Image (tube, grey):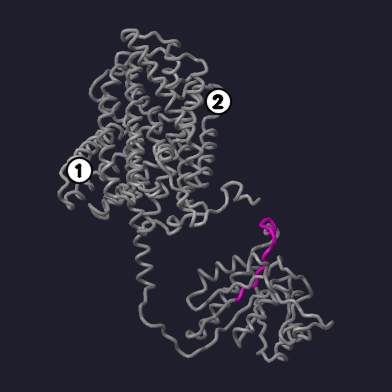
Amino acid sequence: MRLANLLLGRAIPDRAAGQERIGPLAGVPVLGLDALASAAYGPEAALVLLTAAGSAAVGHVVPVTAVIVALLVVVGVSYRQTISAYPNGGGSYTVAKENLGEGVGLLAAASLAVDYLLNVAVAISAGVGALVSAVPALHRHLLPLCLALLALLTVVNLRGVREAGLAILVPTWLFVACLLGAVGLGIAHLVAAGGHPAPLVPPRRLPAAVEPLGLWLLLRAFASGCTAMTGVETVSNGVPIFREPRTREAGRTLATIVAVLVALLAGVAVLARAYGIGATDAREPGYQSVLSQLVGAVAGRGVFYGVTMGAVVAVLCLSANASFAGFPRLCRVLAQDRYLPEAFAHSNRRLVYGTGILLLAVLSGLLLAGFGGITDRLIPLFAVGAFGAFTLSQAGMVRHWKRQGGRPASLAVNAVGAAATGATLVVVAASKLLEGAWISILCVGALWALFRAVRRAYDRAEAATCDEAPLELGARRPPLVLVPVKKLDKVTRKALRFALEISPEVRAVQVLAQGYEREDLTGRWEALVAGPARAAGFAPPRLEIVRSQYRRMVAPIVDHARALAATDRERFVAVLVPELIEKRWYHYLLHSHTATALKVALLFEGGPQVLVIDAPWYLRERRRGARQPLPGDPGASRTGGKGRETAPDRPHPRYA
């Protein structure tokens, strides 16, 4: 079994693309896991700031979360409108570009790209943080664990949307069931105890206040808690992956995600206040996540705790999957509009956009390494991109409904969404600016400039190469063919035979350095090459010796080709490069790769008249016999000296 099949699975044909479509059961894990998992680190991000103001401030997590929940409902309803209006995928980029213009659309795309990137880093670091809180001995391996999980997620997503969904289906719904169960159990204890439940496992004691509670601190807590809303837009971006009717299936998926997330956020906030649960420092040994303390307080540290925390760890680690589903599709749309390289628009063997997946993995790995895999260090960078994309998307939908006319209710919903997310963006950017949000803003601007630069490069190339006129043909003149020769082996003989077939003027060039005079073919050229060619009716190829005093092999041939091209500006010089093709990739470690270096140098330095032609000779020949004769050799007829047919040079069927 080939390694690619083992890691990525067998290639999926286009006719089986419909089988990769999904419904809400798989859609929630594939596109909503990011949003659902944010219930684990969103409240904690808010509590990190509130805990700094002491135990009294922790109680304010409920009103802060209430505002976040209200905003989440508005955004969810707004994106439901987007799904209806854009059944082929209404991501922030598409909506903003079509309704607000190209520049605004690219700003939305840049914001969304930064959000996807940070989501991967935050989700994985939060997942490993949850694991470390359950198994403190793993704390020193924080970053290696993050990178290992990133590699695992990359491979899973390269295997295709359907397989990714199947891989995370059970952990997602187990997470939802366990966490809703813990919240329900905690609420029951809260009601039974008259609002003052006794924890089965007491949470960590809250530290003394280090800063006063004020409006600014509450705004900062709100901004950090808004990280719980990231990922809601992914469903509208991924509508095409749903089975028909795709709009209805996508709408059901989004509604399920928002409903579950609202229940989790509200429940965690209420129980955190009831049990006096605050945030602890993830950089310190003995770190306990908010969910770990909450489940321990509600259900103790028994089997249920183990299953729940296992599901939390799994889901947090896998929640980056939403970005792996959304980021490549964003890159594909940008590439189709020529704002990214064409490679991002092509699906791979498993019908996923592998180039985008790999780029996301590499950038996320660098981000994790740069911030040590610590969630608290990454949170300040988070949410700016998400709310920028939210705001531009909703503003674009307002313009869309104005154009359509007759949908005042839809216009009102999106207008409220645009206003709410815009105000939140201002709060998030202002409160986190000095803590690291400036990095996200800088990245958004850099990506915007990059997209424009890529488009300008494509436009310049198209302007330079576009030609709608009929093909101009002058006098038919065959090219001058130049064949680099090192020694007269089977590889070189095949190149010479082909060169004699396509042009009456063939020149072989041999580069010799001091100490290699014994390889000079001058004395044998007439007998082995020129004479047999002349006898077969071909113009004999001329051997030209080039001396290299600096022992270089590539540059002298490039200079020679350029000099030949300069003698006749109306004629092509075709350099026919003989090259040995080995059986296995590791066999290439034995060779110097001069042929590859020569082709690259000719392509970039040869000039417009110089053409490069590959002349491969394969070791995987089906018939291995005596050397192949040159035209005019005694064995050049169809039958050899013993009356049997001479096998022609032909490649293995794999290369045919």
Q: Nearer the viewer, residue 36 or 124?
A: 36
Task: Tell me the tag on residue 272.
Answer: none
The total number of labels drawn is 2
Where does the image place residue 74, in percent across and percent down from the top left?
25, 35
Left or right, 190 with respect to 643, comes to left
Depth check, mark 2 against mark 1: the one in front is 1
Q: Given the image, on which type of amino acid does mark 2 rest? A: Leu
Relative to 283, 597 lies left or right: right
Local crowd at mark 2 within 10 Å, few (<14), some, or many (≥20)?
Answer: some
- Residue drawn at point x = 70 percent, y = 87 percent: 533
| 541 sits to left or right of 167 | right
Q: Which residues are magenta?
A: 576-587
Front one among 516 and 575? 575
Question: Which label belongs to residue 138?
Answer: 2
- In percent of width and height, residue 46 lies at 33, 25
Name the secondary structure under disc 1: helix
The reply to whether the magenta stretch includes residue 469 is no
